[in-house]
Image: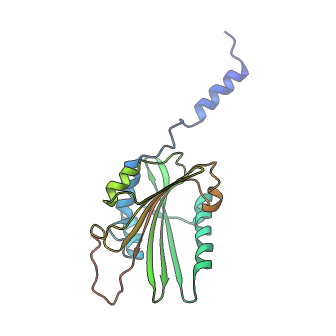
C-alpha cells in the first residue's frame, strides 16, 4: 500500500491539532471557580486579591496574553472617558489553570467620591469556543435570568441583584463571544466571561458580612 505525502501530512495535522471539544468549557468548574475566588471577599478590593492568591491564583502582567492586554486596555480607555476629576481606578489580574487550561481573573476598584465605589470581579476563558449552560449561573445567583441578548456570535445573560443571598452585589453577567463575532473588535476578546460588581461599604460604617 502506498502512503502519499498528503496522507502523511493529514496524519501529522491530526496528531498535532487539539480535539474539536478541547476548548469547550467545563461549566460547573467555571462557575465554581468564580464563586470560590470572587464571593467570599467581594466587598474588598484587597480582600479579593488576598483570597484569590490563597486558592491558587497567581498575579500576572497584562501582556502575558494578547486578549488580556486588549481587555484591560479597553477598560482603561472607557474608564478614562467616563471618569470625573477625583475618580480613581485600580486593577489586578491573576491566572490559574482550570481543567488544564489557563483562565484569567481580573479584580477592579472604581472609586467615585460622593457617589459609589465599585469592586469588580471578572473570570475569563479566552480559549472557550462555546458558552456554558446559563442554568448553572441561575443556580449560583439564586434568581431567574432578567435579560438575554443574542447578536452575531455574542450571547449575554444578566441576572439582577439578590441582596438576600449576597448583600451589596449588583448584576451578574455571563457572556460568550465567538471568534468570528464582530463584537470581538469592541470588547477586545473572544471566549467566555462571568462577572459581577459590588458596592464597597463605607469604612466609617459598621463592617458588613459578605454572606
* Residue at the right extreme, as displayed: 5
The image quadrant where one finds the C terminus is: bottom left
**Which residue is depicted at the point 45% across and 52% down?**
97
State which quadrant residue 46 falls in.
bottom left
Q: Residue 69: image x %, image y %?
A: 61, 64
Q: Residue at x 50, y 38 (%)?
A: 21
Looking at the picture, tell me which residue is in the foreground, 157 or 169.
Answer: 157
Q: Nearer the viewer, residue 175 or 105?
A: 175
Q: Residue at x 60, y 61 (%)?
A: 187
Image position of 2 with respect to 140: above or below: above
Q: Position of residue 129 (x, y in %)?
A: 54, 45
Residue 81 locus on image (x, y percent) = 62, 78
Measured as percent of width and height from the top left, residue 100 is found at: 46, 46
Q: Count the marks: how many?
A: 0
Relative height, residue 125 to residue 160 (above, below): above
Which residue is rendered at x = 71% and y = 18% of the image?
A: 4
Q: Is residue 9 left or right of residue 118?
A: right
Q: Quadrant of the N terminus?
A: top right
Q: Quadrant of residue 15?
A: top right
What colour-coding does the image apply? rainbow
Tell which of 103 and 42 is nearer to you. 42
60 or 189: nearer the eye? Answer: 189
Amino acid at each position: 500500500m502506498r502512503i502519499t505525502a498528503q496522507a502523511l501530512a493529514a496524519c501529522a495535522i491530526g496528531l498535532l491539532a487539539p480535539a474539536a471539544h478541547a476548548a469547550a468549557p467545563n461549566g460547573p468548574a467555571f462557575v465554581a471557580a468564580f464563586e470560590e475566588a470572587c464571593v467570599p471577599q467581594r466587598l474588598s478590593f484587597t480582600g479579593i486579591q488576598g483570597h484569590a492568591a490563597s486558592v491558587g491564583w497567581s498575579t500576572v502582567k497584562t501582556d502575558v496574553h494578547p486578549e488580556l492586554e486588549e481587555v484591560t486596555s479597553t477598560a482603561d480607555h472607557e474608564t478614562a472617558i467616563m471618569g470625573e476629576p477625583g475618580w480613581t481606578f485600580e486593577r489586578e489580574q491573576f491566572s490559574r489553570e482550570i481543567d488544564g487550561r489557563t483562565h484569567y481573573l481580573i479584580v477592579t476598584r472604581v472609586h467615585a467620591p460622593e457617589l459609589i465605589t465599585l469592586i469588580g470581579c471578572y473570570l475569563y476563558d479566552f480559549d472557550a469556543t462555546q458558552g456554558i449552560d446559563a442554568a448553572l449561573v441561575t443556580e449560583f445567583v439564586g434568581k431567574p435570568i432578567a435579560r438575554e441578548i443574542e447578536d452575531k456570535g455574542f450571547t449575554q445573560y444578566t441576572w439582577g441583584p439578590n441582596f438576600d443571598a449576597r448583600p451589596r452585589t449588583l448584576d451578574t453577567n455571563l457572556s460568550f463571544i465567538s471568534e468570528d463575532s464582530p463584537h470581538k473588535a469592541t470588547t477586545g476578546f473572544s471566549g467566555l466571561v462571568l462577572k459581577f460588581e459590588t458596592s464597597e461599604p463605607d469604612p466609617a460604617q459598621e463592617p458588613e458580612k459578605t454572606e
